[in-house]
Structures are given as C-alpha cells and as structure tokens.
Amino acid sequence: MLSNRTALITGSTSGIGLGIAKALAQQGANIVLNGFGDVEGPKAEIAALGVKVEYHGADMSKPGEIEAMMAFAAERFGQVDILVNNAGIQHVAKVEDFPVEKWDAILAINLSSAFHATRLALPAMRAANWGRVINVASVHGLVGSAEKSAYVAAKHGVVGLTKVTALETAPTGVTCNAICPGWVLTPLVQKQVDAKATSLGISNEDATRLLLGEKEPSKQFTTPEELGALAVFFCSPAGNNIRGVAWNMDGGWVAQ
Ligand code: NAD
C-alpha cells in the first residue's frame, strides 16, 4: 500500500517509534530512522522487511540538526511523504521541584521538534498534494497526571499543533492527526515501573499491576504493534479525510 512512499519517524531506535517504523515498512514504505542507542539492530530489522532504510542521528532538541535530518531524507529518498513525530522523554517531579533544564528539554524534544520537522516537511507534501503528519502525543495530551507538568504541557501542545496543522492543510491531500497512547511497556515506562517498585519496596510485577490499575481500566498495555496499525490506517485511503483528531488507544483511560 505504501511502496512508493518514504516515512521518517523520529525517535525510532526503540519502543513505539520502532513499532510504527516496522508497521509502515511492512506496507512497503522506505524508512528514515532517528534516535539514540543501538542503530544497527533496528536498521537490520527494517531492512529484513525488504525496504530501503537510512538513519540520521539528529538530536531532536536542536533545530539545526532537525533541518540537517530533513535535508538528508530529501537527498536520499527525494522527499518525506509520511512524517511521524514520535521522539519523547519523560521526567517525574512536582512543579516546585521540577529541574528547569528538564522542563526545557521536554518542551524542546516532545513539542518544538514536532513543529520544526512539520514546518520543514510540509512544502514538499503540499507540492505532491499527498502527505501524512502523525504526531505521537499521549493520553497526557488530553488529561493530566500529577508530577508530569512538562510532559503534560508538551503533549497538550502537540494536540494543539496537530489541530492547527490539520486546519491549514485541510483543502489539500495532506492530513495531520495525533495518536494518544495510554501505557505502553517501553524503556520510557519501564523506568517508571522500576521507580515505583523501589519507592514502595515491592516487586516489579506488583509495581506493574499498580501502575496499570491506577489509570487503565483494561489493565493491559497497548503495544507498539497496535499503534503501528493505527498509523498505517491513517496512511491508507480511508484516512484521506481524517483531520486533526487526537485518537486515544488507552484501555479506557480517558473514558473515565
Ligand atoms: P522510548 O524511550 O522507548 O523511545 C524514545 C525514542 O526517542 C528513542 O528512540 C530515543 O532514542 C529517542 N530520543 C530521545 N531523546 C531524543 C532526542 N533528543 N533526539 C532524538 N531522539 C531522541 O519511549 P517510547 O515509550 O517509545 O516513547 C515514544 C513516544 O511515545 C514519546 O513521544 C512518548 O512520550 C510517547 N508515549 C509513550 C507512552 C508509553 O507508555 N510508553 C505513552 C504515551 C505516549
């Protein structure tokens, strides 16, 4: 379905980003990966799906590096047809204790990077009259949780950016939507499970049950594969007129 398309997924060396990259590659899209840590493993996983794969190590907190990444993708593949703004980090602390440099980093990586990548991707998408911008927000783009001020502020910002981008592109073949996952067991969430286990002196299994039980009625994690399937749906012809939604996949978290 996507064999003539190129998808760039930020923060795709791990977790949800890698899951979405694999789902798009399974549909035939060529892939540009980004993110830190192991690169060769994810590159090999994508290449095994029979598509072309490139990697750019831009630090998403740095607008100049985002520009270099978008130029690299255009140079290698002609243009980016599908942009998935996914890179994100978390830090947990009360507002009055929140480290200022963590606030700045979360706003830059989780929110401003999506603005920069989108503004750089849109001209070619408009020229082709086809494009998909998919922002990985969070249930925290829709509701709050204590001790996550920067993350919740950034993710609400991503949902706002999604709506404005969707409105500005509404008369065209370019769409913009957000995906809002609840808990997904990735390294980002494993750190929060570990912190809970340590602070309460309980096992990892009990901490996991507690974490899910606090917020998620289904008491089960959403998987990167399920999120990848939603991204594929947005890219399908059925997604042609889905514009500006913030689609939660969250085990009922925000239905409460
Ligand atoms: P993860 O830690 O597994 O992956 C994060 C990715 O972002 C990695 O590839 C990492 O290298 C990359 N990254 C981090 N800082 C970066 C930077 N400065 N520049 C470039 N890349 C950088 O986390 P995840 O859980 O897969 O999170 C992916 C996205 O999903 C994030 O935006 C997160 O907020 C969102 N999300 C996660 C959950 C969850 O429960 N895991 C829930 C809702 C939303």
Image: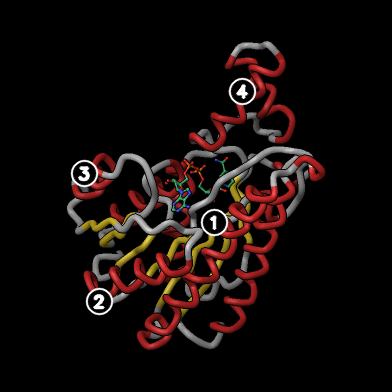
List the residue tagged with mark 1. Answer: 109
Count of numbered circles on the image: 4
Q: Quadrant of residue 81?
A: bottom left
In terms of depth relative to the viewer, which is nearer, 99 or 32? 99
> Which residue is at a point 64% across and 41% down the rendered structure image?
91
Calculate the distance from the C-alpha at mark 2 to the C-alpha at mark 3: 22 Å
Q: Residues within 10 Å of mark 3 (few under 14, many from 20)?
A: few
Image coords of residue 122 (percent x, y): 45, 79
Among the two numbered marks 1 and 4 on one chain, the one whose residue lies closer to the N terminus: 1
Determine whether the residue tagged by mark 4 lies in a helix, strand or loop.
Answer: helix
Tell me the distance, in whole angstroms, between the alpha carbons under discs 4 and 3.
31 Å
Q: Circle 3 sits on which residue? A: 44
First in sequence, mark 2 or 3: give its number: 3
The residue located at (75%, 46%) in the rendering is 255
Label 1 to label 4, Cα distance in Å? 27 Å
Q: Determine whether label 2 and label 4 are within 8 Å by CB.
A: no
Quadrant in which residue 194 is drawn:
top right
Looking at the rendering, in which quadrant would you find the N terminus?
bottom left
Q: Which mark is residue 208?
A: 4
Q: Are marks 1 and 2 in contact (CB under 8 Å)?
A: no
Q: Which residue is mark 2?
A: 78
Is the C-beta of the residue carrying label 1 under 8 Å from the nearest atom of ligand 1? Answer: yes
Give the residue type that dot 1 points to. Answer: Ile
186 on left or right of 75: right
